[in-house]
Image (spheres, helix red, strand yellow):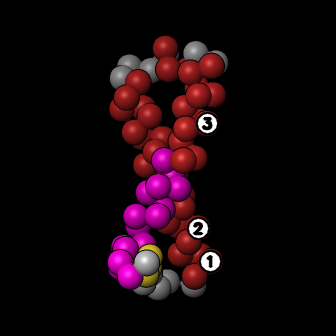
Amino acid sequence: MRYTELNLLGVYVAPIAPMMVAAWVLLIPVRRLADHFGLLRYVWHPALFVFAVYMLLLSALVLLAGRIAG
């Protein structure tokens, strides 16, 4: 597994940064679905639950990128 910096218009960006943005973009429809079906009413702390789902998505993206690169 090899993570290298990305060169975006002359600025070196850590490889985790685009993954964080991608996880956030994926979180938006997941959160809307959870809100639509009323799932957030049944959790103790909705913001903590959404953060945990974000961490799960980010972890999945990092593992997927590692598998593809390796």
Q: Which mark is residue 52?
A: none
- Quarter of the image holding residue 33? top right
Q: What kind of residue is marked 1?
A: Ile
Q: Which mark is residue 64?
A: 2
Residue at 44% across / 76% down in the picture? 8
Q: Which residue is mark 3?
A: 29
- Stretch in magenta: 10-24
Q: What kind of residue is marked 2?
A: Leu
Q: Secondary structure at mark 2?
A: helix
In this view, 60 is above or below 46: below
User: Residue 69: x, y in percent?
Assistant: 57, 82
User: Residue 29: x, y in percent?
Assistant: 61, 36
Spatial CA distance of label 3 from label 2 is 20 Å
Of residue 39 and residue 24, the one placed in the foreground of this image is 24
On the question of residue 51 being in view, the answer is: yes
Residue at 47% across / 55% down in the picture? 21
Residue at 49% across / 16% down in the picture? 42
Choose the circle earlier in sequence order: 3 or 1: 3
Magenta stretch holds residue 16: yes
Q: Which residue is mark 1?
A: 68
Spatial CA distance of label 3 from label 1 is 25 Å
Mark 1 crowd level (few <14, some 14–19, many ≥20, 10 Å Cα): few
Say which quadrant the C terminus sits in: bottom right
Choose the circle earlier in sequence order: 3 or 2: 3
Mark 2 crowd level (few <14, some 14–19, many ≥20, 10 Å Cα): few
Q: What kind of residue is marked 3?
A: Pro
In this view, 24 is above or below 4: above
On the question of residue 59 being in view, the answer is: no
- Quarter of the image holding residue 37? top right
